[in-house]
Image (cartoon, helix red, strand yellow):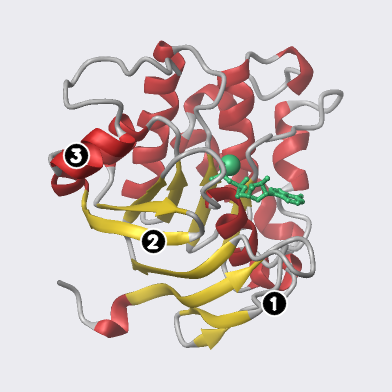
Amino acid sequence: MAPTADILLRVEGVWAGYLPDLDILQGVNLEVYRGELVTLIGPNGAGKSTLAKTIFGLLTPRQGTIHLADEAIGGRPPHELVRLGMAYVPQIANVFPSLTVAENLEMGAYQSRPAGVANRRTQIYELLPLLGQRHRQRAGTLSGGERQMLAMGRALMANPQVLILDEPSAALSPKLVDEVFAQIRAINQAGVTIILVEQNARKALKMADRGYVLENGRDRFTGSGPSLLHDPQVAALYLGGRHDSPSPEGN
Ligand SMILES: Nc1ncnc2c1ncn2[C@@H]1O[C@H](COP(=O)(O)OP(=O)(O)O)[C@@H](O)[C@H]1O
Ligand SMILES: [Mg+2]
């Protein structure tokens, strides 16, 4: 286990919600070590997206704390978090359809010094070669999986320490899911810490260093990817049975 100093993100006892008297997150905890790929799974409505939005400053914790390294970030607005090294791709990863791939990437660097942008874009093309091949193509003409990769590439333009991805595989065919997951792994191997929210729980746990199962706004189980995959209770409740076959929910 890495020493505490290596914890990059720590969520402690966080309560948050959208409406005044309705808490969606109810004391959730999450720790992410530098360099890790951590996945958040759990049933629909468990609060996974709400947690992602709260970490990225789109919702303010009503109780509890969030730290990025040593800095308390709970309630800080997204543009400040981007400057501190956080990036977020929402569940519906919109790209600018009439702009080219290259222009979309540029939009991801609006807070960066202009001199670094071209270099950064070249690095993204090395990491996600498909974007390089398509750099002149308008984003509106890309497939769903390609658009997802572009949204990830755009988030990476700000050179984040930690990237939060909310269901990047939603609505993709199984083949594209594998491609997008391979890209996520490559991004992680390039040194970016990743928080991956996924419906595709088995695939996500196979790839992750660690996972959290969220339910009713709380962290219900946590452990290494394999230990959660093989935990009979987790399998029965959240993975659609114990067999290692495609789950009935498809995607
Ligand atoms: N913008 C919103 N306004 C009010 N309630 C919301 C909003 N977004 C989500 N919720 C509610 O918060 C709960 C958790 O949703 P969400 O975090 O999206 O779950 P998950 O991502 O795990 O499926 C659900 O009950 C959902 O209806
Ligand atoms: Mg969600």
For marks 3 and 2, the one nearer the N-term is 2
Task: Estimate the spatial distance between the alpha carbons at disc 1 and disc 3, rounded to whole Å.
Answer: 33 Å
Residue at position x 51%, y 48% in the image: 46
Residue at position x 76%, y 63% in the image: 111
Q: Label for residue 219?
A: 2
Indicate whether 102 appears above or below 60.
above
Indicate whether 131 appears above or below 216.
above
Residue at position x 19%, y 39% in the image: 229
Residues 201 and 32: in front is 201
Q: How would you rate the neighbour count of disc 3 (Cα within 10 Å): few for under 14, some for 14-19, many for 20 or more?
A: many
Residues 156 and 60: in front is 60
Q: How would you rate the neighbour count of disc 2 (Cα within 10 Å): few for under 14, some for 14-19, many for 20 or more?
A: many
In the structure shown, which secondary structural element does the residue marked by tag 2 occupy?
strand
Q: Is residue 206 visible?
A: no
Q: Is residue 27 visible?
A: yes
Q: Nearer the viewer, mark 3 or mark 2?
A: 2
Residue matched to label 1: 75
Looking at numbered disc 1 in the image, what kind of residue is underneath it?
Answer: Gly
Residue 143 located left or right of residue 114? left
Indicate whether 26 appears above or below 172.
below
Residue at position x 71%, y 59% in the image: 115
Residue matched to label 3: 229
In the structure shown, which secondary structural element does the residue marked by tag 1 occupy?
loop
For marks 1 and 3, the one nearer the N-term is 1
